[in-house]
Amino acid sequence: MRKYSLILITICITKLLPAQFSDSVTYYTGLNATGTYNKTNDGGELYNFNNAAKLSVRKKSMSLNSNTKWVYGKQTNVLTNNDFSSALDFNLYKTLPHFYYWGLANYTSSYSLKQNHQLQSGLGIAYNFIDKPGANINVSDGLIYEYSDVILNDSTNEIYDTWRNSFRLSFRWDIRSRVFINGVGFFQHSLNYGDDYIIRSDLSLGIRLKKWLSLTTALNYNKVSKTQRENLLITYGLLIEKYF
């Protein structure tokens, strides 16, 4: 029965969305393509590509965000990354100043972290300590339900579910609309298993060439204690974005 909690929470998220919208709407689309490639006579061939797409809809009292990421890489014809994630989240701002509620539904499949399938869904609260056009620092916390199919260190499969506390710290700094720094970090520990936790962090630096085009470099780190796996990825490339 517990695995159906994910579906029930996701339905609740969907039901909340339409009633919160106001008349003023802002849309955002972003496509980020980064990667590395190297080929030598002695070292063989190495490449890694990190592609991400984002769509956001923002109204006065609410925002809805969709994020999809795919990382693929090989080294000397050996697969190193085939990691896919897709998330849908919303924020409700009809509360105290700088305070809001959030909800999410997330799917992950990661070759490098030995996660065959991971489904997460949950709700929580957040607060903006700094909330200005050029700077933002945000802290959030909430409860999420997870249903996972993973490969353990001894190469056996384990299918399990758990409740997690999800803590997030994020920031954004925009310097004269030319240089921007974004960062977000998650710590999600299981409420059922003391040694089960997930760490995720993303840090990116961008330089705007035009209003819609930027050069970016990114550092991504992930650790899953259940599978005893972690990865670190540093990439560079282009970000295409548009508000309308």
Image (cartoon, rainbow, N blue to C red):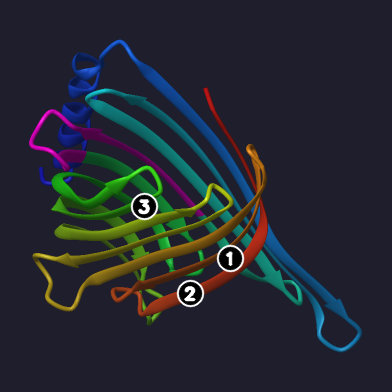
Three-letter code for the amino acid on which mark 2 is drawn: Asn
Give the overall secondary structure of the magenta segment: strand
In the rendered image, the residue lying farthest to the front is 176
Three-letter code for the amino acid on which mark 1 is drawn: Asn
| Above or below 155: residue 54 | above
- Residue placed under numbered mark 3 in the picture: 135
Distance, label 1 to label 3, CA atoms, is 33 Å
CB atoms of marks 2 and 1 within 8 Å: yes
Q: Secondary structure at mark 2?
A: strand
In the rendered image, the residue lying farthest to the right is 41
- Residue placed under numbered mark 1 in the picture: 81
The magenta-colored residue range is 84-102
Q: Is 85 contained in the magenta span? A: yes
Residue 241 found in image quarter: top right
- Residue placed under numbered mark 2 in the picture: 231
Q: Nearer the viewer, mark 2 or mark 3?
A: 3
Q: Is 181 contained in the magenta span? A: no
In the rendered image, residue 34, in percent from the top left (x then y), is placed at 66, 57
Sequence order check, earlier mark of 2 and 1: 1
Mark 1 residue crowding within 10 angstroms, few (<14) / some (14–19) / many (20+): many
**Looking at this view, is 65 or 83 the one in front?**
65
In the rendered image, residue 96, in percent from the top left (x then y), is placed at 8, 37
Q: Is residue 120 left or right of residue 34?
A: left
CB atoms of marks 2 and 3 within 8 Å: no
In the rendered image, residue 43, in percent from the top left (x then y), is placed at 81, 86
Residue 115 found in image quarter: bottom left
Q: Nearer the viewer, mark 2 or mark 1?
A: 2
Sequence order check, earlier mark of 2 and 3: 3
Q: Secondary structure at mark 1?
A: strand
Q: Is residue 58 left or right of residue 124?
A: right
In the rendered image, residue 95, in percent from the top left (x then y), is placed at 9, 33
